[in-house]
Amino acid sequence: MSQGPEEGLPASPGRKLTLLPLVMVMFFTVSGGAYGLEDLVGASGPGMALILIIVTPLIWSLPTALMVAELSTAIPAPGGYYAWVKRALGPFWGFQEGWWSWVTSFVDMAIYPVLFADYLNALLVQQFDYHLLEENELAHWAVTLVIIWTFVLVNIRGTKGVGEASKYFGIFVLVPFGVMSVIGLFQMIGNPVSFWRPFVPEDSTMLGAFGTGLFVVMWNYLGWDGLSTVTDDIHHPRKTFPRALAVCIPLVALAYLLPVGAGLQAAPDWAGWTAGFFPEVAAMVGGKWLGAWMAIGGLVSAAALFNALMMSISRLPYFLAEDGFFPQAITRRHPKYDSPYVAIALCASIYSFFTLSAFSSLVVVDVIVYSAALILEFAALVALRIKEPNMKRPVRVPGGWLGIVLVTAFPMGVLALAVYSTWQEEGIEALYLSFAAIATGPILYPILNRFVKKGRPSVPVEIEYEDGTRSVK
């Protein structure tokens, strides 16, 4: 039976994430900088883009973070959200949570090595007129494999190594955005312009611009629950995890808001804002040197995103195997670093395959499948308030049941609007494919339960009550 993160023998110092490394790993599981927000400006208009960057953390990130803070401190169990749902709703729904969350990573995680190769190609073409990566698909794929398997090695060496790498990656990514923001602020003072106009494009309605932009920006604020899967590798998780959430939410919001505002001051032709435009904007603000730094920062951001997300996602097949749904070989840990190296290598092999082709069209499916997994987490929050009212909750969603309703309603409304936007933009076919992906979980559960699990007991999840007693089931 797995022990809780603060019980039994202390974890190896090489596996402990303290506050600053945790903040930076969390930053890269959620954000990675303002790269990718260019399409938000081009699609929704300057004013609406700025409003969405400000409002989305309040109606999406903050409620989700409050839910994560309550459940992660009440049940700081290995497996994070998988364990929460399993304890609250039972093994069937726990499996759905783990399976759906892992399946969405197949496409998402393959995107970052491909982005790295694309950024590298653009840099080589612009600076050296070197076209190998765009002319040779094998060379392009080779670059993605180098990124994947380099960070497999980093992850196998333990979570502390991932945290230390994320600190340096964070400095390299955030500093050019900070420099651009400061220069842009002085330019704004010296030559003020209405950089927020037009509020929405002339050919769009207010609701249309909001819905289109929300689809983009919500994905730039996703992932607050991700690191709950490694709570056993966090130093005093009941204190450190909520503190990291409290630091990271405003950090991410400012990392988006300030560069976009500064960029619109220098590049007011908002219709030209498309993916990959930030290096050009930075060059307009501070010169070619800043543009080059921003371009290299895009490379670092893509690599850092993959590195951080690999750490959290690779735990899902590990815990599913621990519960008997996958072969037990996946639960093997490295003899020196105590990392789940087989699970890490399994994930990397899947991602290596998915980088072969353009799976970007399947990202729409991820919106729906991720939504299903997140809904289960909010359902677990509500179920545990009902079933386990006396459970020790070091951090609670404030406001009693009214607070629970509000914290749940806002993200559900955002998800509903995103699904509606997907239906409007992609058609009903995207919804059919999404529901088919969701259906794989209920279909696989009885098959794996009978032929792989074969009646083996699941790892119990322990909770503590206010009076100090404990319940394990």
Image: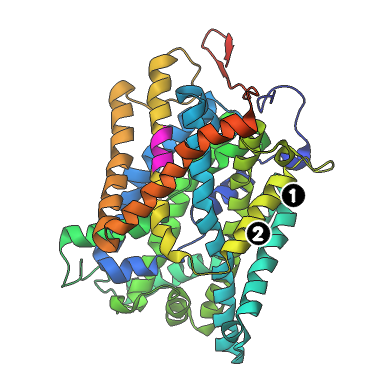
Q: Earlier in the sequence, mark 1 or mark 2?
A: 1
Q: Residue at x 77, y 42 (%)?
A: 14
Residue behind mark 1: 156
Provide the residue span drawn in magenta: 372-377
Q: How many marks?
A: 2
Q: Position of residue 422 (x, y in %)?
A: 30, 57
What is the number of the mark on residue 33? none
Q: Residue at x 63, y 86 (%)?
A: 132
Instruction: Residue type at mark 1: give it.
Output: Ile
Q: Is residue 107 magenta?
A: no
On the rendered structure, is 425 left or right of 77? left
Q: Quadrant of the N terminus?
A: top right
Q: Quadrant of the C terminus?
A: top right
What is the number of the mark on residue 168? 2
Name the chief secondary structure element in magenta: helix
Looking at the picture, does residue 199 appear above or below residue 338?
A: below
Instruction: Residue type at mark 2: give it.
Output: Tyr
Disc 1 vs disc 2: Cβ atoms closer than 8 Å? no
